[in-house]
């Protein structure tokens, strides 16, 4: 395989599977910045070891395995700083989230469809909370509403989205 075709194949597989790999990392590392760093490190290692990838096998599973070892490595370095999941917990999470990760594209598509059905003010609340990463308190201050009312509205929005996504996935036989 030429360098150019190797690069193209790696990029094709990565683009098709990056959401799955990132979702796995994010399930173990709640901080988005740390998850981004770990994802970048994982991709670099995947590229350096791409010659060991067996064509025809699951690229996502291969990448998730590399990501798992990256998470464990970082966990060892920072073990004394905070509470962390045990190695067994990480193994169990990897097994449990595998079916979820396999269908992440369908879930994201369902989420986008469901978001498009929300009222514009509800979309704006979701955007402020998750895209702008504003706190509920900051959103309440900006909207001139109580923190409790924002929490209640967000709970209703989450519930509506969850029901909508589950219904959409059930139609696809994925629920």
Image (spheres, rainbow, N blue to C red):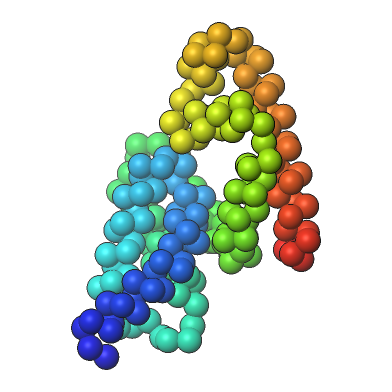
Residue 23: x and y in percent read: 50, 54
Q: Nearer the viewer, residue 169 or 74?
A: 169
Quadrant of the image for the C terminus? bottom right
The answer to which image quadrant residue 125 occupies is top right
Q: Can you give x and y, in whole percent of width and height, for residue 61 in the image?
A: 49, 71
Of residues 61 and 172, the one nearer the viewer is 172
| Residue 46 appears in view | yes
Q: Quick check: 120 left or right of 43?
A: right
175 lies above or below 31: below
Within the image, what quadrant is residue 133 found in? top left
Q: Is residue 95 left or right of residue 134?
A: right
Residue 10, picture quadrant: bottom left
* Of residues 54 and 162, the one drawn nearer to the viewer in this rendering: 162
Q: At 38% from the left edge and 74% from the top edge, which residue is drawn?
A: 12
Report the residue at 50% width, 77% height from top: 58
Q: Between residues 50 and 161, which one lies in front from this camera angle?
A: 161
Please say if 6 is above or below 123: below
Quadrant showing the N terminus: bottom left
Q: Does the image show residue 86?
A: no
Q: Is residue 139 above or below residue 115?
A: above
Q: Residue at (54%, 14%) from the top-left corner?
A: 143
């Amino acid at each position: 395989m030429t360098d150019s075709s190797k690069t193209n194949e790696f990029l094709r597989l990565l683009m098709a599977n990056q959401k799955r790999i990132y979702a796995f990392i994010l399930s173990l590392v709640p901080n988005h910045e740390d998850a981004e760093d770990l994802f970048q490190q994982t991709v670099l290692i995947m590229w350096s070891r791409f010659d060991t990838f067996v064509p025809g096998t699951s690229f996502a599973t291969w990448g998730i395995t590399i990501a798992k070892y990256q998470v464990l490595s970082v966990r060892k370095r920072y073990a004394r700083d905070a509470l962390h999941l045990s190695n067994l917990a990480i193994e169990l999470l990897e097994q449990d989230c595998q079916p979820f990760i396999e269908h992440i594209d369908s879930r994201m598509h369902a989420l986008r469809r469901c978001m498009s059905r929300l009222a514009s003010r509800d979309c704006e609340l979701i955007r402020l909370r998750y895209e702008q990463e504003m706190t509920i308190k900051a959103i309440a201050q900006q909207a001139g509403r109580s923190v409790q009312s924002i929490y209640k509205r967000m709970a209703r929005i989450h519930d509506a989205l969850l029901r909508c996504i589950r219904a959409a996935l059930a139609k696809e036989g994925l629920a």
